[in-house]
Image (cartoon, grey):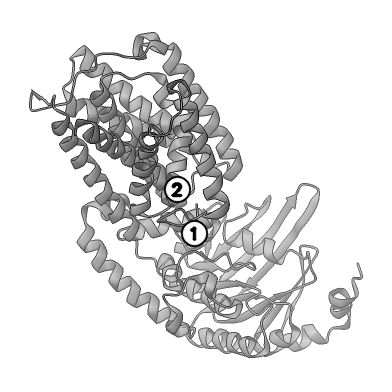
Amino acid sequence: MDYFYSYLILAEIYTLLGLSTNLLVGVVGIFSVSQAAVFGVGAYIVGDFLLAGTLSFLPALAVAALACILLNVLISLPSLRVAGDYFVVTSFGIQLLATATFTNWTAGTGGANGMPGVPPPDLLGLPIESTRGILAVTTVATLVACLAFWLILRAPFGRLLKAIREDESAVAAAGKGVLSAKVSAAALAGAFAGVAGGLYATYLSFIDPSSFDLDASILLLTMVVVGGARTLAGSIFGPFLLLALPQVLTFVAIPTTYAATARQLVYGALLIAFALFRPQGLLGERL
Amino acid sequence: MTAYLEVCGVTHNFGGLQALNDCAFAISQGGITCLVGPNGAGKTTIFNVITGFLRPDTGRVGFRGRTLSGLAPQAIVHAGIARSFQNLRLFTDLTACDNVMLALPDRAGETPFGALFRPFATARSDRRRRADALERLDHVGLAARADERVRNLSYGEQKLLTIARLLATGAELLLLDEPASGLAAGALDQVMVLLRRLRGEGKTLLVVEHNTRVVQQIADEVLFLHQGHLLAQGPPARIIADPALAEIYFGGAL
């Protein structure tokens, strides 16, 4: 049962990330390949505060969310100047920069050896040690994020964001500001990723740069492509499906040393297959 | 008396190409002014300058006695000038109604704060907005297609939708870039009737148009642009009858 709970917790954390990526990439069309970097910053900030004992879980999570809001706005800013393909290149550079920082800044992140012993989350001074307790926390966070995503998509704000993805000049010609809407969306996506990072660090209690590298960013994009862009259902379904795959793969007789490679292969093949044959994903729209 | 819209000495270069060369004209309030001229005369460029999409190298644009130069496109819409695009630029994944709703000046619920923390007020104001948008769609004869995605609309319907979206901004001076091009006879007549009706409702229209028949039928005044410079201004009959202008327009003389 704990094994299943563990799957649910991770799937929920990745749902937060899926919502973050879908908002930015699917809804507004800011094609970021560095969302895992923002996720990582959230995770390391919460890890650092809890290990140092300077803040308890919720304040640390709030600081992480705030930092990720600022960071995501900052790294999305080039999208106001460079569009489409060029932004992907910029974003790629940001991801490499983040991975290099996570790997080499030993004092803040533990470097390549990772950051062990992150304490479990606590509420009002009571540590939440049980898997079920943590599941409750991630479920609440995911439900709140889902509600926020849904409210945004159905509000005029969501309509504005979708219009921006299609044609920024036409939005300006309709008398609406593009800049403030893009910045707001990036901020929200940053908050989701930051909270996901904090939950991830406290649940696993060990984090290292491999969870926040380019592969992780591309996994998040794959989740959006497979689940479907611009829908709540797609943002949830993508992560739940893709995280179930490794479990399914364990039933296939491949040596454990190749398991990670096999997983990457399947993710890559899925990304290609969906882009070619079902660009709208399973439950969404075309990216 | 100051002119309604005033373009003074506007020059704009794209690299080595002089798109606008000391372009100057003024139009008065009310009525339909057609902007004509051969390809590359600078018609769309002057639209882009007036609406803030291009910053001219020199010169100024004035509207109701106020200088617009340097304002962002959305600020110019708020000042009362809105434009359509030659290539439509509709939001094709959204519905016709959404396209119009987006252009309404109401900004309630357009920030995450409103969307997240005032969901009920946002939903209420959006219902009002939808009613407004349906009215605009009805105005151009598209009410029945309100919930259709734009990419499923015919080209003629899409052209009408760009006018509905333009109306939604609430602007009083409308700049239309070839609203009649590419339309079959029936749809063409429909657009001309619509433009005349807008004039009757007090809008001022500046229209880029190539079709001389359309120009003759709708224009109160014609501006003839050539090589980025205003060559002639006057009633349509006189401009169209001028052999020198006809030579430039059809003959490609320099």
Label 1, label 2: how many angstroms apart (C-alpha)? 29 Å
Report in which chain the residue with disc 2 lies. A
**Secondary structure at numbered mark 2:** helix
Write down the residue under mark 2.
Answer: A226
- Viewer-nearest residue: A155 or A109: A109
Q: Is residue B190 left or right of residue A74?
A: right
Q: Residue sitting at 43 percent across and 52 percent down?
A: A228
> What is the three-letter code of the residue carrying label 2?
Val
Label 2 crowd bin: few (<14), some (14–19), many (20+), radius 10 Å: many
User: Is residue A30 positioned above or below A231 on the image?
Assistant: above
Q: Is residue A86 left or right of residue A119?
A: right
Mark earlier in primary sequence (1, 2): 1
Any part of residue B28 in sight: no
Query: Residue B209: percent from the left, percent from the top?
Result: 70, 77
User: Is residue A86 positioned above or below A255 on the image?
Assistant: below
Query: Residue B165: percent from the left, percent from the top?
Result: 48, 72
Query: Residue B5: percent from the left, percent from the top?
Result: 58, 69
- Viewer-nearest residue: A166 or A270: A270
Residue furthest to the top in view is: A107
Label 1 crowd bin: few (<14), some (14–19), many (20+), radius 10 Å: many
Q: Quadrant location of the C terminus of chain B?
A: bottom right
Write down the residue under mark 1.
Answer: A171
- Viewer-nearest residue: B227 or A161: A161
Give the total of numbered labels: 2
Q: Splitting the image into 4 quarters, where does residue B180 fall?
A: bottom right
